[in-house]
């Protein structure tokens, strides 16, 4: 019996709960499991025997989770095998996720997270604790939502040296730029609509100033390319000064403009770049797209939905099955 704790119950945490409520789907992969706690910053529901996910989702819909143990009390006092950490991202401090993740790893629980902050701030330290404690730290959901990238690069491209990773890591920017491309609207005309898509960060300047893309790039550089990068190593230019006229000129020459994040031995960079109109990275809407360049497999392209409640939850579930799936296949 696998005991799961869900820490953070916003859109992603609730998406995970919805998928886990479908036992027929998930037990085929990992056998029997119970969610023993669901918590957010305002309340929690918990029981060592397992809680009703439907009730937890319903409680959240009606308002807040009931007052109960705090997230740290759940971590310290309850018995669980794996924590799903989906609290909001803070790229400066990594908190509160950083403290949660450290505490869970130190007590010997696996951690699956969608939270970029802790990995940007302390990837090496967290990876070392996980290794020492012989537990897994999995974070497919931090980059590109449902777009397979971390496990693809680490496992399916095993044996390759990854020489560069470049592409679109922010759906909000891509939506804005592709609307500018197609309708020649100004940046400000589309910004409001982009916020309504519910994939923008709470502070949309994280998206449009390239900060979210840079955070994801740091995680990729460290976790997939074996670099030792920090956020300040990334050269960042956002999309706020791109004009419809810039698109006019680019498109006359057969190009479009996309916010491209690139990590290579030459460094880390996020900036608007010209992309040939029919290039695989010239995706439209909220899609993310990445080109992984390797020495043996050469070019590998991946395109997928980089954000969204169920899409991001799908990446978390894939990590869960990756940790426990060998029980059944
Ligand atoms: N704000 C992000 C985006 C969400 O637009 O891609 C996924 O990290």
Image (tube, grey):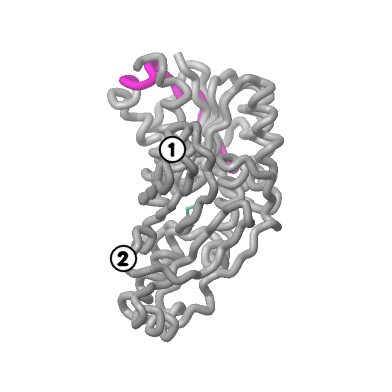
Q: Residue furthest left?
A: 24
Callouts 1 and 2 close, C-beta under 8 Å: no
Give percent across and percent down for residue 249. Answer: 40, 84
Relative to 131, is 88 above or below?
A: below
Is 26 placed left or right of 70 in the picture? Answer: left
Give percent across and percent down for residue 283. Answer: 35, 61
Q: What residue does disc 2 label?
A: 278
Disc 1 residue: CB within 8 Å of ligand 1: no
Q: Identify the mark nearer the N-term, 1 or 2.
A: 1
The image quadrant that residue 321 belongs to is: top left
Q: What residue does disc 1 label?
A: 152
Q: Is residue 37 magenta?
A: yes
Q: Residue at position x 52%, y 43% from top?
A: 162
Give percent across and percent down for residue 316. Answer: 45, 36
Is residue 193 in view?
no
| Disc 1 residue crowd, few under 14, some 14–19, many 20+, Cα 10 Å | some
* Residues rendered magenta in the picture: 27-43
* SS of the residue under disc 1: helix
Relative to 8, is 173 above or below?
A: below
Camera-side residue of 179 and 50:
179
The number of numbered badges drawn on the structure is 2
Question: Where the N terminus falls, by quadrant?
Answer: top left
Give percent across and percent down for residue 253. Answer: 36, 80
Camera-side residue of 269 and 163:
163
Is 196 placed left or right of 70 in the picture? Answer: left
* SS of the residue under disc 2: loop
Is residue 36 in view?
yes
Q: Residue at position x 66%, y 21% from top?
A: 133
């Amino acid at each position: 019996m696998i005991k799961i704790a869900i820490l953070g119950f916003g859109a992603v945490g609730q998406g995970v709960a919805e998928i886990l409520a479908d036992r027929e789907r998930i037990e085929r992969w990992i056998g029997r499991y119970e969610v023993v706690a669901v918590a957010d910053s305002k309340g929690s529901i918990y029981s060592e025997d397992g809680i009703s996910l439907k009730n937890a989702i319903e409680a959240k819909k009606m308002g807040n989770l009931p007052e109960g143990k705090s997230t740290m009390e759940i971590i310290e006092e309850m018995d669980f095998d794996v924590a799903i950490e989906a609290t909001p991202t803070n790229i400066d401090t990594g908190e509160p996720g950083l403290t949660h993740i450290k505490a869970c790893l130190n007590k010997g629980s696996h951690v699956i997270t969608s939270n970029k902050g802790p990995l940007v701030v302390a990837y090496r330290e967290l990876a070392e604790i996980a290794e020492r404690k012989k537990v897994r730290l999995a974070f497919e959901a931090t980059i590109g939502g449902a777009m397979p990238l971390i496990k693809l690069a680490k496992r399916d491209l095993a044996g390759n040296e990854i020489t560069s990773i470049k592409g679109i890591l922010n759906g909000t920017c891509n939506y804005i730029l592709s609307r500018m491309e197609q309708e020649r609207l100004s940046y400000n005309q589309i910004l409001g609509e982009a916020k309504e898509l519910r994939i923008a960060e709470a502070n949309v300047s994280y998206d449009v100033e390239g900060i979210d893309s840079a955070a994801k790039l740091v995680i990729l550089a460290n976790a997939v390319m074996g670099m030792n990068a920090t956020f300040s190593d990334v050269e960042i230019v956002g999309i706020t000064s791109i004009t419809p006229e810039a698109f006019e000129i680019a498109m006359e020459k057969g190009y479009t403009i996309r916010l491209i994040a690139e990590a290579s031995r030459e460094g880390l960079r996020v900036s608007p770049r010209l992309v040939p109109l029919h290039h695989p990275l010239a995706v439209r809407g909220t899609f993310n797209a990445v080109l992984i360049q390797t020495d043996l497999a050469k070019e590998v392209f991946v395109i997928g939905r980089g954000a969204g409640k169920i899409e991001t939850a799908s990446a978390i579930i894939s990590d869960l099955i990756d940790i426990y799936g060998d029980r059944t296949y």
